[in-house]
Image (cartoon, rainbow, N blue to C red):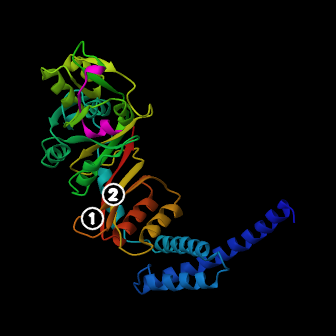
């Protein structure tokens, strides 16, 4: 057979598969009607396990796992179709609609905003890009920013969550578990760090460098080229620059933004110190009350899934069935449990889509713990 002959054969087989799929979904429609009449749950784990066990045992050698994956997706589609047919509980959809209805038409141009550190930090730069006129209040740490928002001292807060070089900002992800804030917008900020020191200082003079832990990771290759240099963590990059400016020592430097040069009257003694020119940090804007502004296209959530085989795969199948683009999947340990994890999901979608609202409701019902962190725009 030629490759064209093979393709024609596959086309014929696909036509039969499609016809059988339609027949199966017709039966699923009837099942949905019967389950609705008897108030029976759409999900039947026992039945699904029996099907997958039979499929695996009846598969040709080497095709068992592929057959199981096929039927797992098929059953996920069937469940989604059943829920759609039965007009499922609108609880989640109504909650999300209520949030959208009470959210202002436009994202505010000015507000009181909490940031970590001091003037010159990347958080402040991100804040000024998110708001035209921001009345910024500075706090020593991420927890302080969250408390200021939760207590109503500040309407919004700005926090870093990810970096393209150094990865996740662990402290912020830990705070997300508290459920005390909601994400209402995000921004990707290009990071360009420099090494700052007192005027007249040479690179060879440096014995100690101050900075926040994240820039040390982002500039690790440059740091390796320095000999016998001590690294000291600070609350923020701007704090590091201020410490250098206020010190009498001339053998110290700070990794910080260019803005800190003029703010602290320091010299740039080394540029291009990052591991990659493509160095971006993603900042989120948080609020106490959930808000979904028009144009929101990204969703973040947390879910604690059943501690059993296939639990995560079941969730991923739901995303795949709806054709959703997942942009982040992060696992974090659950405090007090032995090697059990909660999952953070970021994906491109809008709750204005009824199918997405139904998906979120489904995830909430099936998860041990579920937290909708927000639906928002990303700049």
Residue 206 lies in magenta, yes or no?
yes
Is 8 on the left or on the right of 371, as rendered?
right
Residue 26 pos. (x, y %):
60, 78
Tell me the quadrant of the picture where the N terminus can be found: bottom right
Nearest to the eye among marks 1 and 2: give it. 1
User: Is residue 349 something one can see in this rendering?
Assistant: no
Q: Which mark is residue 322?
A: none
Query: Which segment did they paint magenta?
Result: 204-217
- Which residue is at 65% across, 81% downward? 59
Residue 237 lies in magenta, yes or no?
no
Tell me the quadrant of the picture where the C terminus can be found: top left
Q: Quadrant of residue 221?
A: top left
- Which residue is at 44% across, 79% downward? 42
Is 303 on the left or on the right of 321, as rendered?
left
Is 313 on the left or on the right of 267, as rendered?
right
- The residue under label 2 is 96
Please report whichever mark, 1 or 2, sits nearer to the chain's N-terminal start: 2
For the residue pair 335 and 20, the one nearer the viewer reads as 335
Residue 183 pos. (x, y %):
30, 48
Q: CA distance from mark 1 to mark 2?
A: 27 Å
């Amino acid at each position: 057979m030629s490759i064209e002959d093979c393709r024609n054969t596959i086309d014929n087989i696909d036509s039969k598969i499609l016809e059988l799929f339609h027949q199966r979904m017709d039966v699923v429609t009837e099942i949905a009607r019967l389950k609705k009449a008897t108030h029976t749950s759409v999900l039947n784990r026992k039945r699904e396990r029996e099907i997958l066990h039979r499929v695996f045992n009846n598969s040709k050698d080497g095709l068992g796992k592929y057959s199981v994956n096929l039927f797992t997706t098929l059953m996920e589609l069937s469940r989604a179709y059943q829920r759609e047919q039965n007009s499922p509980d609108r609880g989640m959809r109504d909650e999300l609609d209520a949030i959208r209805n009470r959210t202002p038409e436009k994202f505010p141009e000015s507000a009181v905003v909490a940031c970590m550190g001091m003037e010159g930090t990347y958080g402040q730069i991100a804040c000024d890009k998110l708001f035209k006129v921001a009345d910024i209040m500075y706090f020593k740490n991420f927890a302080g920013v969250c408390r200021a928002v939760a207590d109503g001292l500040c309407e919004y807060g700005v926090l870093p969550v990810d970096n393209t070089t150094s990865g996740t900002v662990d402290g912020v992800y830990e705070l997300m578990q508290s459920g005390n804030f909601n994400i209402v917008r995000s921004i990707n900020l290009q990071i360009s760090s420099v090494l700052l020191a007192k005027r007249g200082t040479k690179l060879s003079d440096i014995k100690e460098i101050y900075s926040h832990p994240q820039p040390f990771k982002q500039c690790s290759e440059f740091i390796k080229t320095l000999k016998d240099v001590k690294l000291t963590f600070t609350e923020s990059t701007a704090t590091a620059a201020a410490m250098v400016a206020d010190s009498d020592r001339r053998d110290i430097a700070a990794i910080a933004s260019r803005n800190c040069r003029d703010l602290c009257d320091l010299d740039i003694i080394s540029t291009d110190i990052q591991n990659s020119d493509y160095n971006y940090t993603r900042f989120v804007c948080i609020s106490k009350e959930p808000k979904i502004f028009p144009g929101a296209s990204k969703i973040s959530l947390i879910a604690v899934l059943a501690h059993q085989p296939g639990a995560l795969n079941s969730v991923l199948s739901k995303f795949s069935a709806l054709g959703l683009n997942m942009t982040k999947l992060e696992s974090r340990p659950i405090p007090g449990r032995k090697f059990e994890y909660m999952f953070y999901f970021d994906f491109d979608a809008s709750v204005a889509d009824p199918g997405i609202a139904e998906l979120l409701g489904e995830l909430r019902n099936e998860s041990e713990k579920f937290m909708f962190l927000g639906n928002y725009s990303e700049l």
